[in-house]
Amino acid sequence: MTYTSREVAAAADMTLTDVRRLWRALGFPDARGQANFTAADVEALTLVSELVRDDVIDFETVLRLTRALGRTMSRLAEWQVSTLSAADRSPADTDRSNAAFERLLVYAWRRHQDAASARLAEPVDDGDQSGAGHRTTTLTVGFADLVGFTSLSNALGTDELAALVEAFESRCSDLVTAGGGRVVKTLGDSVLFLSPRPVVGTEIALAVIESLGTDPALPDVRLGIATGPVVLRMGDAFGPPVNLAARLTVVARRNHVIIDAATARRLSADAYVTRALTPRPMRGFGDVEPITVRRRGV
């Protein structure tokens, strides 16, 4: 059985306006009077309606969570379908793998939920604060960028380009995670990651250079590192350190790490050698003094 927007709203005891807002937040266009909804949609909306009615959660928070869920699931679904589309599988195998993936999805979500709760419970600096749907905390931000990706992508075939991006993103993500950081997002030719302390972020950056920067099968890499207050919202990160880390990659030499002054001040002189470069203008920051970093004795 299928329902129109009005019918599914009535069945879930919600207003048509709220149903449309949730549907858009999930990432789908308006049904425009067509019977595009099923019993599963009614069940999901009824659950939301009950939570809001019982004051378990307010509607604006539901909207924020729905928007985050929609963006995440959209990307995950595209990733899953494109990854498995090349395989010659029977309908039965497809159904079995989808059922298994659904169970693994819930498992992974629960593990990451535990990890996120643990991070939230960690002691924070005096300047940290929480707000509606976001949290501000002092972190070290890393931005890894492939050199010459635009010209390289124009010269490669689609399969070669896809393999290159997959190798860069997967290897970089593994190094970030192994080093104690967390990947926020990947953008094809770049990876944005967070780390709890400057020394952790710096070690991750150096590990990326040592691993990827010496691989002849991959382009050279540049790393920018900045430390400061970061706004964490809907799984993403915002704030001056995020922008500065990206700006620093522009001035970094191939297979080198550039850090800001805030990061440099927190690194031990016994373990690292830092060298200030000539100040240069960076959009949104004025004149900035980039700083190179390497391990002492290397």
Image (cartoon, rainbow, N blue to C red):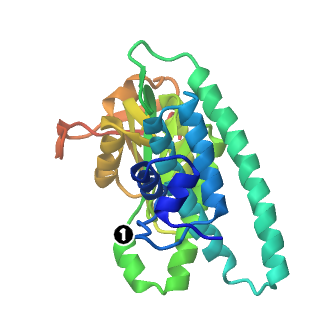
When the figure is inspected, residue 72 is found, relative to residue 193, above or below; the finding is below
Tag 1: Cα neighbours inside 10 Å, few (<14), some, or many (≥20)? Answer: few
Residue 284 placement: quadrant: top left
Q: Please state which of residues 161 and 134 is positioned toward the viewer in this rendering.
A: 134
Side of 293 relative to 180 (left or right):
left
Q: Where's residue 131, x and y in %?
A: 41, 25
When the figure is inspected, residue 7 is found, relative to residue 35, above or below; the finding is above
Side of 287 relative to 70 (left or right):
left
Residue positioned 66% across, 81% down in the render: 85
Side of 100 relative to 175 (left or right):
right
Q: Where's residue 151, x and y in %?
A: 34, 77
* Total count of labels: 1
Q: Is residue 215 visible?
A: no
Q: Please state which of residues 89 and 228 is positioned toward the viewer in this rendering.
A: 89
Q: Secondary structure at mark 1?
A: loop
Q: Please state which of residues 190 and 255 is positioned toward the viewer in this rendering.
A: 190
Residue positioned 76% across, 68% down in the render: 98
Q: Where's residue 287, x and y in %?
A: 16, 38
Q: Is residue 227 visible?
A: yes
Q: Quadrant of the N terminus?
A: bottom right
The amino acid pointed to by label 1 is Gly
Residue positioned 45% across, 30% down in the render: 139
Residue positioned 51% across, 43% down in the render: 65
**Mark 1 lies on residue:** 148
